[in-house]
Image (cartoon, grey):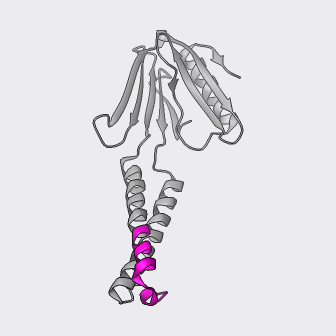
Amino acid sequence: MTASTTLNTSDRVLHQQILGSRRFSNYWWATIVSIGASGFLLAGLSSYLKINLLPFADPTELQFVPQGLAMTFYGIVGLLLALYLWTLVVLDVGGGYNEFNSETGEIKIFRKGFIGKNRQIEISCRTQDVQAVRVEIKEGLNPRRALYLRVKGRRNIPLTQVGEPMALTQLENEGATLARFLGVPLEGL
């Protein structure tokens, strides 16, 4: 669920950091797409300018119409996709924290969003409104393992990071720790 969970001030505040888009797989794919798209764009421009811009191939032999034009198009589209991926990484979309404070009775869920009016998502509620911590496990082609906070008068609030599903033991441990901290039942196991 989280990158790190910490208890503060004599076990009265539970703070969980949530990993967003700044994970290794996103860096990897943004880099691969950037390199590939640059190669396609340089190959297309080389066929148009008849100047070799690639050190490992000679695309000046290609006819600009249709091969060079298609490669230029794929290069531009690939660079736009790479720009989107790098923007996600830089803004750390989905990153944030869950904070449960038993001293003040407040729960605060914070996530970073994408560019725009709703750049940040912040949910606050009272600890006495929490009915349960719910575990959702869905196996199959698109598995999902997540923790939700069931709150009176609201939809279930997701607490886990988006992306690859977490291990079952970690999910159970995180859910049990949170349910014990809040003094509510753990559902779904």
**Residue 136 found in image quarter:** top right
Q: Position of residue 156 (x, y in %)?
A: 52, 20
Front-lying residue, 143 or 104: 143
Q: Position of residue 95 (x, y in %)?
A: 43, 40
Q: Residue furthest left?
A: 117
Residue name at image x 42 percent, y 58 percent: 81
**Mark count:** 0
Residue name at image x 61 percent, y 26 percent: 175
Q: Position of residue 71 (x, y in %)?
A: 44, 74
Q: Which quadrant is home to the C terminus?
A: top right
Asked if residue 75 is positioned above or below residue 181 in the image, the reply reads below
**Residue 173 found in image quarter:** top right
Q: Does the magenta segment cover residue 57?
A: yes
Q: Is residue 189 left or right of residue 117?
A: right
Q: Which residues are magenta?
A: 55-74
Q: Position of residue 133 (x, y in %)?
A: 58, 20
Magenta stretch prevailing secondary structure: helix
Asked if residue 94 is positioned above or below residue 77 in the image, the reply reads above
Q: Does the magenta segment cover residue 56?
A: yes
Asked if residue 43 is positioned above or below residue 188 in the image, the reply reads below
Residue name at image x 40 percent, y 56 percent: 86
